[in-house]
Amino acid sequence: MELKQIAAYLLNKKGTTEETPFGPEALVYKVMGKMFALVAWEADPLTLTLKCEPGQALLLRDIYPAVLPGYHMNKTHWNTITLDGTIPAAELWGMIDDSYELVVQSLTRAQRATLLS
């Protein structure tokens, strides 16, 4: 999976911005100012850190060796995925969708209304 594909998919999510608050080596994707994805774009292979429900995070770690507890993140709620080709694309897109939705659900009612308008 290439950075261009990942970035395009992330930026296609409504209300998403790309920022570099941790320095140029980490691309952070936020919805309404809240992070839902982080790409270590200089890593080889790329790594992608995503928010995840705790039970699902553990399940994904059991299924895929490329899914590890979130690097420098709350390991209960974040997974870091090594994009080494071992995770099917559909599964990866689903992980991104879930991360985005978890963050959108945590927004205030007013923020969600703004996002939907």
Image (cartoon, rainbow, N blue to C red):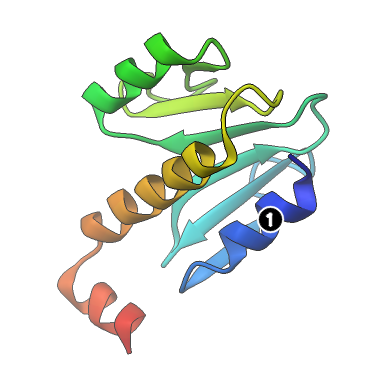
Q: Which residue is mark 1?
A: 7
**In this view, which residue lies farthest toward the left?**
109
Q: Position of residue 88 (x, y in %)?
A: 57, 33
Give above or below for 99 relative to 50.
below
In the displayed orientation, state which residue is furthest to the bottom: 117
Answer with the quarter of the image where residue 12 lies: bottom right
Q: What amino acid does circle 1 point to?
A: Ala
Q: Nearer the viewer, residue 66 or 106?
A: 66
Indicate the secondary structure of the residue bearing disc 1: helix
Total residue callouts: 1
Q: Is residue 108 left or right of residue 72?
A: left
Provide residue 23's location: percent of width, then percent of height. 74, 42
Specify the quadrant that holds the N terminus.
top right
Residue placed at 51% from the left, 47% from the top?
93
Q: Position of residue 31 (x, y in %)?
A: 44, 63
Q: Quadrant of residue 44?
A: top right
Closer to us: 15 or 8: 8
Residue in the image at 35% along x and 78% along y: 115
Disc 1 crowd rating (10 Å Cα; few below 14, some 14-19, many 20+) is: some
Q: Residue at x 39, y 21 (%)?
A: 60
Near-viewer residue (81 or 23): 81
Examine the image and state in which quarter residue 110 appears: bottom left
Q: Is 5 positioned to the left or the right of 107 in the image?
A: right
76 relative to 7, above or below:
above
Which of the image's four quarters has the C terminus? bottom left
Q: In the figure, 10 relative to 12: above or below?
A: above
Which residue is rendered at x = 58% and y = 16% of the image?
66
Q: Position of residue 20 (x, y in %)?
A: 69, 51
